Image (spheres, rainbow, N blue to C red):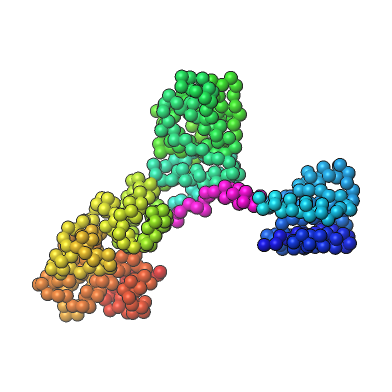
Amino acid sequence: MRQTILIVDDEPVQRRLLEAAVTRAGYNVLKATTGNEALELLAEHKDVVSVVILDLLMPGMSGMEVLRTLNQSSNPIPVIVQTAQGGIETVVNAMREGAFDFVVKPVAPERVIAAVEKAVKFNEIRKPVQRLGKAVKSGFTFDDIVSKDSAMVPVLSMGRKAAASNIPVLIEGESGVGKELIARAIHGSSARSGKPMITVNCGALPENLVESLLFGHEKGAFTGASEKHVGKFEEADGGTLFLDEVGELPLDLQVKLLRAIQEGEIDPVGAKRSIKVDVRLVSATNRSLLSEVKAGRFREDLYYRLNVLPMTIPPLRQRQNDIQPLVFHFVKKFAREENNKSISAIHPAAMKALAAYNWPGNIRELENAIFRAIVLCESEELGIHDFPQIVSQLPGFDVPETAVSDRLQSGLAIVDAPDMQTPQTAGFMIGTPVDPVPSRAPGSSEHGAAQVSPTGNYGMIQMITADSQIKPLEVIEGEAIRFAIDIYNGRMSEVARRLGIGRSTLYRKLKEHDLEEHIQQD
């Protein structure tokens, strides 16, 4: 692709000479006679222009003003300035304003083309570096956090405000709720995102090496110190230091941590002088640090230094609306990572079971459950049988051991279970008992309400009456509709689609079976 050069000069003869030289060299040309016109062209062709040849002496907006404006943009273009006044002061001023190169009129075409070629090469080399810088800058932000629950709205709002400053943040919450994720979002959304974020798990540090790992040490500072070691504080200089489980720090180290925060400097073990560091501090704990302070296990002065902006992340059991989007996020993530892209859905029964679980391990436990299910799944849809560890802990759920043939002999029909095709897989269709469905069959009092399998198996409808007779089809139909409404949480569009009927037909049948109280807006 041919590069485009913008020539900015108010002298017609000079413009034509430059245009001829640049065109012969194989470049496309755009021309401007004033500074304002040049800026307008650049705004219109900002992704096309590779180099600007700029005259410094022009009426109206001077070339120096144009150069200053271009240099302040987020993606400056290499500028070759030219002028008839070639004094040292002019050259220095132009270079200070960001000029790439400088030529003095009259200039030989070869000199101009040589400067243009260098600027083009520089621009081509710089582009991937800029893309990398943008990738680092964007990093992980609050926009990447998967959450739809209202309980997380104040947390995310406070996190965004924290990212706009260097205020110390203390994140509290149970293990596995995503404290480190919030810390990463704060860093990625801050002005420090281009610098490193260093994570330290204070609970996992060997007690005799905590000081060395945090603050570093000099060669020969102690037995085994065969070389100089840079500590985590120094590694995070200019960026963010995330102290996870900060409540685990020994009391003697808490004193040194307090000094590092107050003075902005650290003392490596064995060093003769302190080292200045510029670190943004984010801490996290699954304990109540205030309780630790009252018990004498955490310094009160350090607590107030860390707890400038406290944030508490609610556990997953208090964020029911986050379960479904998190499930979909992890399914997509692990299906891609495990090269099992055929898995594209999760059965409503499985989703209902996951939503009913208490998740004591929070998001980390949910992530591991989805990972395990993806690895073990042998179909294109995650079913309830792919989560045995979860389902076995839910009250009212049972793992039936009987085969499909046994169920059919007892009058059970499998509803909405396409993956139950063999006795082996059928034995794991697990779920909560379905509430009885009031279905009225005129003149058939013995039919009464729909019954669920005596074993409480999810997805089973009793087809046999108390006197061992087959139920009328209209009764079974009413039970199936009620069951579908329960499965799909009253979403009538989905209920109609899954039952293979139109919405108008569904509403008509709801009236026929006296189920109108279950109608909800999608």
Quadrant location of the C terminus in the rendered image: bottom left
Q: Image height check: is 196 above or below 276?
A: below
Task: Please give the name of the residue rendered at 33% of the width and 53% of the height, measured from the top-left corner.
Answer: 375
Give the residue at the far left of this rendering: 467
By secondary structure, the bulk of the magenta-drawn segment is best described as helix
**Does the segment drawn in magenta span residue 142?**
yes
**Residue 312 falls in image quadrant:** top left
Position of the N terminus by quadrant: bottom right
The magenta segment? 126-148
Q: Is residue 144 left or right of 354 when viewed as pictured?
A: right
Residue 401 position, x and y percent, is 17, 58
Q: Residue at x 13, y 67 (%)?
A: 410
Q: Which quadrant would residue 261 be assigned to in this image?
A: top right
Numbered-mark total: 0
Q: Is residue 171 above or below residue 471?
A: above
For image coordinates 45% across by 43% down, the residue present is 179
Name the side, left or right, on which 489 lies relative to 261.
Answer: left
Which x, y percent locates residue 223? Answer: 46, 19
Q: What residue is rendered at 82% in x and 62% in y?
A: 20
Q: Nearer the viewer, residue 403 or 318?
A: 403
Coordinates of residue 366 in the picture (x, y in percent): 36, 50
Task: Answer above or below: position of 291 versus 112.
Answer: above
Is residue 130 covered in magenta? yes
Q: Work out whether residue 308 can be spotted.
A: no
In the image: residue 290, left or right of residue 456 = right
Residue 474: image quadrant is: bottom left
